[in-house]
């Protein structure tokens, strides 16, 4: 079934069931292989209006934030293929914080990486990200961390300064909620 959907977007992609430890998604999200490299295919069916617009907005923000290393990059924009909209993203091997199911992280370096990523996104005028534990992936060796889902966000030029500051603070507090005070203190 998953390979069938992948084929409809790009028959040269191979669905990698062995890497599919992904948390359940609202969009169609699959680890896939192309020419020996692994990527993530993220797609939405056009009758799913909300997800369709989410994937399209994610593509736009990934274009804007292409230089930020703490997020999974846009590799290819398929645009509309048949009834799907689809993008290919960098795959970041590891486990999302929900799947990992550990308590709070106490690692200062991991906190530093996420704080830097959020600060860099803010400097591009991007805030109000959906920083739930399913959207943050820790590498297999547990030394690197990335935000892997950018489909929810707001842009600075659509709001006043107070709102910007408020949303910015909410995002930092969300990130802090995954760590012990020692890690971010
Ligand atoms: N680039 C990636 N690298 C590694 N794992 C990923 C990547 N993208 C997604 N995943 C895994 O797939 C899951 C679903 O992906 P994603 O969050 O993008 O879908 P979604 O439809 O936006 O989900 P939701 O709307 O429920 O947040 C993630 O929780 C994560 O486990
Ligand atoms: Mg998600």
Image (tube, grey):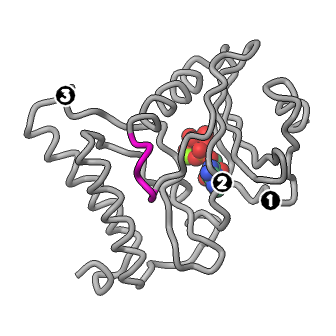
Q: Dot 1: few (<14), some (14–19), or many (≥20) neighbours within 10 Å?
A: few
Determine contact: label 2, label 3, CB under 8 Å: no
Label 2 lies in ligand 1 vicinity (Cβ under 8 Å)? yes
Q: Is residue 115 above or below residue 170?
A: below
Q: What label sits on residue 19 in the rendered view?
A: 1
Stretch in magenta: 65-70
Left or right? Give the position of 112 relative to 89: left
Q: What label sits on residue 91 in the rendered view?
A: 2
Q: Is residue 96 above or below residue 135?
A: below
Quadrant in which residue 29 is drawn: top right
Left or right? Give the position of 74 relative to 21: left
Q: Of residues 140 and 47, which is closer to you in this image?
A: 140
Q: CA distance from mark 1 to mark 3?
A: 39 Å
Determine contact: label 1, label 2, CB under 8 Å: yes
Look at mark 3 in the image and give the residue it sits on.
157
Q: Earlier in the sequence, mark 1 or mark 3?
A: 1
Q: Is residue 117 above or below residue 139?
A: above
Label 3 lies in ligand 1 vicinity (Cβ under 8 Å)? no
Residue at 31% in and 65% down: 115
Residue 68 forms part of the magenta stretch:
yes
């Amino acid at each position: 079934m998953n390979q069938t959907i992948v084929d409809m977007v790009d028959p040269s992609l191979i669905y990698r069931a062995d890497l599919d430890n992904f948390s359940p998604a609202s969009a169609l999200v699959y680890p896939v292989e192309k020419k020996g490299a692994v990527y993530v295919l993220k797609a939405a069916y056009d009758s799913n209006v909300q997800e369709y617009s989410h994937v399209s907005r994610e593509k736009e923000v990934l274009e804007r934030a292409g230089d930020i290393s703490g997020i999974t990059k846009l590799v290819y924009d398929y645009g509309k293929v048949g009834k799907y909209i689809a993008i290919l993203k960098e795959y970041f091997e590891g486990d999302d914080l929900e799947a990992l199911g550990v308590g709070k992280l106490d690692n200062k370096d991991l906190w530093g990486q996420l704080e830097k990523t959020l600060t860099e996104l803010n400097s591009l005028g991007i805030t109000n990200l959906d920083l739930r534990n399913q959207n943050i992936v820790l590498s297999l060796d547990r030394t690197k961390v990335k935000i892997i889902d950018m489909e929810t966000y707001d842009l600075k030029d659509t709001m006043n300064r107070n709102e910007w500051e408020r949303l910015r603070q909410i995002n930092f507090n969300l990130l802090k909620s995954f760590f012990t005070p020692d890690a971010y203190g």
